[in-house]
Image: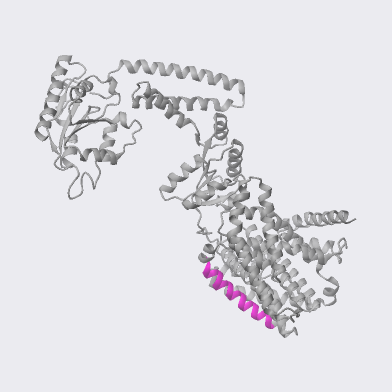
C-alpha cells in the first residue's frame, strides 16, 4: 500500500536522523555529517531500507530551493551594500583562484574541459550549512574570522545561482524543436511574473492574510509562494532555485521578512536534512570502493588546494594571521551546492555518471573532514599557545538599542516619545494595520509573535539595551519576560502591567520598572474630579501623589503573599483603611497650617 | 498690560496673598498667572509663558517668601522661561526695558530680619538674588512691596498694603495706557 510505505519511509528517515544527528553533533562533527551518515546507513549500500533514492533526491532538492529563498531573504540590498568589500572583493578572489586551480587539476586528470569547469567551480563553493553551523557552535560568527567567512559564503551563495543556471549551457543542448527565441521569451516571461508576484502581489496579499490572524495560513501561504514560484520557473525551463532566490531578494525588504524566515525555517531545515540524507544514500559505494585511490586523491587534492588558497587570501579579508588556518579549515570543504551543480551537470550531460558519483562522494567526505580539521586546528593551536585571545568586536549592524514588543496604544506612545528624541525603536507586533502605519513613520517593524525567541533574536534582542514589553495579554507579557530574563539577563525590561496580579507577577520575576496601564491615567482623572469639586490643582496633585505612594507600598506588602488569595484580600482591606486614615490625618494637619514649611 | 506671575502652592490657604490679589484682580489690564494652578505637575510651558511676558509692560512676581527665596515652582519658572537667547545673551533681550516689581509676604515681623534677630540679617540681604534676576534680564527694578509678618498683622494693616498695591498698579496703568 502506497500510504503505508510513505509512512514507513518517513519513520526510517526521521528515525535515522534522530539517531545519527544528535550523536554527531554531540561529537562536535555537526549535523550535516549526521544526515549524510544517516543516509549512507539506510541507503542501498547500507541497510538497504530505502531503494527509491532518485525520487527522494529529487523531492528533497526542494530543501535547496527553500534554502535559496531564505538566502535571498537575507540579502537585504542595504546590508549587502554595507558588506560589499569583503563579499565581492574577498568572495570573488576566493572563487576565481580556487575555481581556476580546481578546474586545472580536474582537467589534468582527464576530465573533459566542460566537466572540469563545471565541477571545478562547483567544488570551489564551500558549504554554508556546515561552515555557519561550525562557526556558530564555536561562537565565531561575530568574530573577524567568522565575519570574513560569512562574507565569502555569501558571495558563493550568490555566485551559485548563475553557476547553476549556466552549467546546462556547457552541455549538449537537446533540441526540443522549439526556436531559441520562444524559450528565451518564456524564461523572461517567467522572471517578469516572479518579479510582479514578489513586488506587487505578495505584500498586500500577506497583509490580508496576516489580518486573518490564523497563524498557520500565513505559513501555508509562505510555502505556497515558494513552491508556486519554483514550479513556475521549472515550467519555463529555468532553475527552481533561481526563482526562489529571486523571490527571496524581492521580499527581503518587506516587513514580513522575519515572519517568512521563521515560518519557512523549519521546513527548510527538515527538507535540507532529507536532501543530505538522500545525498548520503546516493553515494555509490560500489563505484567508490572500486577506485579508492582516485577518491582519496580527489578528497586530498580538493582540501589541499582550497586550504592553501584560503589561508593565503585570509589576511586580505581581515583575518588575523593566527587564525588563517582556522579560516581555511572552516571553508575548505565543498558544499551542498556542489551536489546541485553535479546533478544539473549530469542531466545536461556535462558530467559523466561515474565522475558524478566519485565527485559526490569526495564532496561528502570533504564535508565530513571539516569538523575534524577544525578540531585538529584547535588542538594544535591550543598546544602552541595557551591563549592569545583577541577581543570579539561587536558587529556594527543596524540594530537599535530599544525593542518594543507590542505596539498598541501603549507601546506606541513609548515608541513615539523615543522617536521624537531620535531613537527609532525596533517594533514587534502582530497587527498588520499597525505595521503599515509604522513603516510610514520609518520604524523598523518585525511582524510576528513576540513570544518566540527566534523572532526576538532576529529583531536584535541580543544587542538591545532596553526591551519595552507592552503586549496586550498577561500571558504573552510574562512569557516574553521569562524568555528574555533567562537568556539575556543584561537587558533592561520595562513592562506594562494590565492589573495588580500582573504587576505582582512581574515584580516577582524581578522586573522593577513596571507601570500599570491604567493607574496613572486614572489618577489624573481623579485629580480632575477633585478639581471639579473645588480642590486646587496643586493640592489635587499632592493627593494623587500620596495615593500613589501608599498604593505602591501596600502592593509591595502584598508581594510575599500574593499567591495566597485570602491574605491578599485582607491586606488589601487593611491597606484601604490605612489610606483613609492617612488621608484624614493629612487633611487635618493641612487645614491647621497657614502655609508651606519654610515660610519665614 | 501688567502680568502678575503668582506662585503659591495652596492659593486657597493664603490669607495675605489673597487679600493682595483681590485688591488688583479687577483692574483692567492686569492679568494673573497662578503658576501652581496652571502647572501642578511642574510641566511649565515655557513658550506660552514667554509669549505672555512679551505682551506685558510690567511684570510682577508675587509669592510668599519660602526659605528666603521664591517657591520651588517659581524658581523652576525662572530656570525654564528666562533662558539664554531669549531673556539674555542676545542683542535685544525679550524683556529689555520692561519693569519688574516684586511682591512678597514673609512669615516674620521686620525685626526678625536684623542682626541678632531670628534671621540674623536685614531683609535687604535677601533681595539681591531676585533683584539681580530681573536686572540680568535687562528689566527695570521697581520698588518692591514687602509684607512682613503677614499672618500676624491685623486685617486693617493688611488692607493698607492691599490699597497701596492697588494704587501702584493703577497709577502704572494710567501712566502707560
Residue A138 visible within the image = yes
Left or right: residue B97 versus residue A215 is left
In the picture, residue A67 is in which quadrant? bottom right
| Spot occupied by residue B132 in the image (x, y as percentages of width and height) | 17, 38
Q: Name the residue rendered at 84%, 53% in the picture.
A: A7
Q: Magenta region, mostly helix, strand or loop?
A: helix
Residue A304 visible within the image = no
Left or right: residue B36 versus residue A178 is left
| Spot occupied by residue A89 in the image (x, y as percentages of width and height) | 54, 73
* Magenta region, residue range: A83-104
The residue closer to the viewer here, B93 or A312, is B93
Left or right: residue A81 versus residue A361 is left
**Seen from this angle, which residue lies furthest right?**
A1
Asked which colour scheme the image uses, the reply is one colour
| Spot occupied by residue A112 in the image (x, y as percentages of width and height) | 74, 84
The residue closer to the viewer here, B36 or A387, is B36
A173 vs A217: above or below = below
| Spot occupied by residue A373 in the image (x, y as percentages of width and height) | 68, 67
Amino acid at each position: 500500500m502506497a500510504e503505508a510505505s510513505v509512512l514507513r519511509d518517513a519513520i526510517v528517515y526521521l528515525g535515522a536522523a534522530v539517531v545519527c544527528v544528535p550523536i554527531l553533533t554531540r561529537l562536535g562533527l555537526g549535523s550535516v555529517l549526521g544526515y549524510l551518515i544517516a543516509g549512507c546507513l539506510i541507503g542501498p549500500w547500507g541497510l538497504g531500507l530505502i531503494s527509491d533514492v532518485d525520487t527522494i533526491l529529487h523531492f528533497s532538492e526542494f530543501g535547496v530551493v527553500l534554502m535559496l529563498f531564505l538566502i535571498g531573504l537575507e540579502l537585504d540590498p542595504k546590508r549587502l551594500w554595507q558588506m560589499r568589500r569583503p563579499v565581492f572583493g574577498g568572495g570573488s578572489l576566493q572563487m576565481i583562484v580556487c575555481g581556476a586551480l580546481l578546474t586545472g587539476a580536474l582537467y589534468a586528470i582527464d576530465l573533459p574541459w566542460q566537466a572540469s569547469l563545471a565541477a571545478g567551480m562547483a567544488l570551489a563553493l564551500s558549504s554554508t550549512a556546515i561552515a555557519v553551523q561550525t562557526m556558530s557552535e564555536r561562537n565565531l560568527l561575530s568574530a573577524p574570522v567568522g565575519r570574513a567567512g560569512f562574507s565569502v559564503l555569501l558571495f558563493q551563495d550568490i555566485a551559485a545561482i548563475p553557476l547553476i543556471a549556466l552549467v546546462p549551457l556547457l552541455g549538449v543542448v537537446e533540441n526540443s524543436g522549439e526556436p531559441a527565441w520562444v524559450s528565451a521569451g518564456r524564461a523572461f516571461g517567467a522572471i517578469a511574473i516572479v518579479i510582479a508576484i514578489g513586488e506587487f502581489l505578495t505584500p498586500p496579499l500577506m497583509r490580508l492574510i496576516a489580518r486573518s490572524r490564523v497563524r498557520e495560513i500565513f505559513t501555508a501561504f509562505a510555502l505556497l509562494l515558494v513552491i508556486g514560484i519554483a514550479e513556475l520557473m521549472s515550467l519555463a525551463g529555468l532553475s527552481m532555485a533561481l526563482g526562489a532566490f529571486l523571490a527571496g531578494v524581492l521580499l527581503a525588504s518587506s516587513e514580513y521578512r522575519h515572519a517568512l524566515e521563521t515560518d519557512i525555517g523549519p521546513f527548510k531545515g527538515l527538507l535540507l536534512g532529507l536532501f543530505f540524507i538522500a545525498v548520503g544514500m546516493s553515494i555509490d559505494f560500489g563505484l567508490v570502493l572500486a577506485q579508492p585511490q582516485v577518491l582519496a586523491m580527489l578528497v586530498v587534492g580538493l582540501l589541499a588546494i582550497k586550504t592553501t588558497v584560503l589561508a593565503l587570501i585570509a589576511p586580505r579579508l581581515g583575518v588575523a594571521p593566527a587564525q588563517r588556518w582556522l579560516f581555511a579549515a572552516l571553508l575548505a570543504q565543498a558544499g551542498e551546492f556542489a551536489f546541485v551543480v553535479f546533478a544539473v551537470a549530469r542531466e545536461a550531460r556535462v558530467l559523466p555518471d561515474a565522475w558524478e558519483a566519485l565527485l559526490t562522494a569526495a564532496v561528502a567526505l570533504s564535508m565530513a573532514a571539516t569538523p575534524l580539521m577544525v578540531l585538529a586546528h584547535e588542538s594544535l593551536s591550543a598546544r602552541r599557545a595557551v591563549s592569545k585571545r583577541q577581543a570579539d568586536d561587536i558587529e556594527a549592524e543596524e540594530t537599535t538599542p530599544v525593542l518594543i514588543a507590542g505596539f498598541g496604544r501603549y507601546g506606541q506612545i513609548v515608541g513615539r516619545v523615543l522617536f521624537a528624541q531620535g531613537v527609532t525603536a525596533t517594533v514587534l507586533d502582530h497587527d498588520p494595520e499597525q505595521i503599515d502605519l509604522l513603516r510610514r513613520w520609518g520604524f523598523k517593524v518585525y511582524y510576528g509573535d513576540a513570544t518566540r525567541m527566534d523572532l526576538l533574536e532576529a529583531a536584535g534582542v541580543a544587542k538591545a539595551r532596553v526591551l519595552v514589553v507592552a503586549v496586550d495579554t498577561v500571558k504573552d507579557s510574562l512569557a516574553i519576560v521569562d524568555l528574555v530574563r533567562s537568556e539575556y539577563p543584561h537587558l533592561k525590561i520595562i513592562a506594562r502591567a494590565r492589573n495588580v496580579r500582573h504587576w505582582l507577577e512581574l515584580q516577582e520575576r524581578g522586573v522593577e520598572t513596571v507601570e500599570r496601564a491604567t493607574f496613572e491615567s486614572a489618577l489624573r482623572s481623579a485629580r480632575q474630579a477633585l478639581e471639579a469639586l473645588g480642590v486646587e490643582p496643586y493640592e489635587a496633585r499632592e493627593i494623587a501623589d500620596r495615593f500613589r505612594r501608599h498604593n505602591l507600598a501596600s502592593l509591595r506588602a502584598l508581594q510575599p503573599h500574593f499567591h495566597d488569595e485570602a491574605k491578599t484580600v485582607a491586606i488589601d482591606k487593611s491597606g484601604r483603611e490605612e489610606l483613609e486614615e492617612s488621608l484624614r490625618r493629612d487633611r487635618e494637619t493641612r487645614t491647621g497650617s497657614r502655609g508651606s514649611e519654610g515660610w519665614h | 498690560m501688567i502680568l502678575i506671575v503668582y506662585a503659591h502652592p495652596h492659593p486657597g490657604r493664603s490669607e495675605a496673598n489673597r487679600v493682595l490679589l483681590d485688591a488688583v484682580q479687577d483692574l483692567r489690564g492686569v492679568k494673573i498667572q497662578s503658576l501652581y494652578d496652571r502647572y501642578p505637575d511642574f510641566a511649565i510651558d515655557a513658550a506660552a509663558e514667554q509669549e505672555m511676558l512679551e505682551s506685558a509692560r510690567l511684570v510682577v512676581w508675587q509669592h510668599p517668601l519660602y526659605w528666603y527665596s521664591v517657591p520651588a515652582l517659581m524658581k523652576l519658572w525662572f530656570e525654564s522661561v528666562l533662558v539664554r537667547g531669549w531673556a539674555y545673551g542676545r542683542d535685544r533681550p525679550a524683556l529689555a526695558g520692561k519693569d519688574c516689581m516684586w511682591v512678597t509676604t514673609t512669615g516674620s515681623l521686620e525685626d526678625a530680619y536684623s542682626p541678632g534677630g531670628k534671621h540674623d540679617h536685614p531683609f535687604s540681604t535677601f533681595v539681591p538674588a531676585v533683584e539681580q534676576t530681573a536686572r540680568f534680564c535687562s528689566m527695570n527694578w521697581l520698588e518692591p512691596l514687602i509684607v512682613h509678618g503677614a499672618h500676624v498683622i491685623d486685617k486693617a494693616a493688611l488692607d493698607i498694603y492691599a490699597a497701596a498695591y492697588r494704587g501702584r498698579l493703577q497709577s502704572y496703568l494710567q501712566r502707560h495706557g
